[in-house]
Image: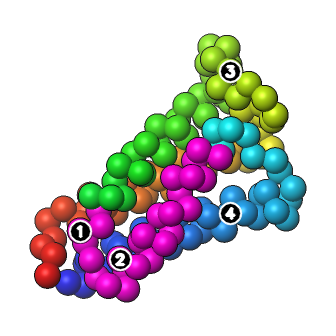
Amino acid sequence: MKNRIVFLYASWVVALIAMLGSLYFSEIRKFIPCELCWYQRILMYPLVLILGIATFQGDTRVKKYVLPMAIIGAFISIMHYLEQKVPGFSGIKPCVSGVPCSGQYINWFGFITIPFLALIAFILIIIFMCLLKGEKSE
């Protein structure tokens, strides 16, 4: 029971920090999100609500809803990161209008960009959800 709550709570905190971070970048720092950023947001923002409710209800059954969203979000983040960092992927051009997806508003330590941060959040959520696997729902 205790592990279940810890993993749910950790997942919720990660999703909440990711959401607040993306809002900070767009609303305070005035970074305009590209199309792939929006897709990542579309998959991350509901996780805050879903995981928050599941955490306070102690409901591990939520993993069957959270995992697909987190896995898809991770794949989009990987594609976005490759678009930014690998020259061969820059020709794909998933963003056809507005802000280019290859733009890097931040580049901490030469490799940490906004899609990288989103990828880390999605991966952490996936890991925490997988750690719930052995737990039984009550």
User: Where does the C terminus fall, quadrant-wise?
Assistant: bottom left
Who's the residue at 72% across and 32% down the image?
A: 101
Instruction: Determine the residue positioned at 77% across, 58% down.
Output: 25
Q: Magenta segment range?
A: 38-63
Give percent across and percent down for residue 27.
82, 62
Local crowd size for mark 2, using a 10 Å CA cut-off: few (<14), some (14–19), many (≥20): some
Q: Is-magenta flag for residue 111? A: no
The residue indicated by pointer 2 is 54
What amino acid type is highlighted by mark number 4?
A: Gly
Residue in the picture at 85% in, 64% down: 28
Earlier residue among tags 2 and 4: 4
**Which amino acid type is shown beneath numbered disc 3?**
Lys
Q: Judge from the rendering whether residue 113 lies leftward or rightward of residue 18; answer left or right.
A: right
Residue highlighted by disc 4: 21
Mark sitting on residue 61: 1
**Residue 87, image x and y in percent?**
67, 17
Per the image, the residue denoted by label 3 is 93
Callout 4 crowding tier (Cα within 10 Å): few <14, some 14–19, many ≥20: some
Specify whether 38 is left or right of 55: right
Instruction: Locate residue 24, reporting x and y percent.
Output: 76, 64
Q: Is residue 1 above or below residue 27?
A: below
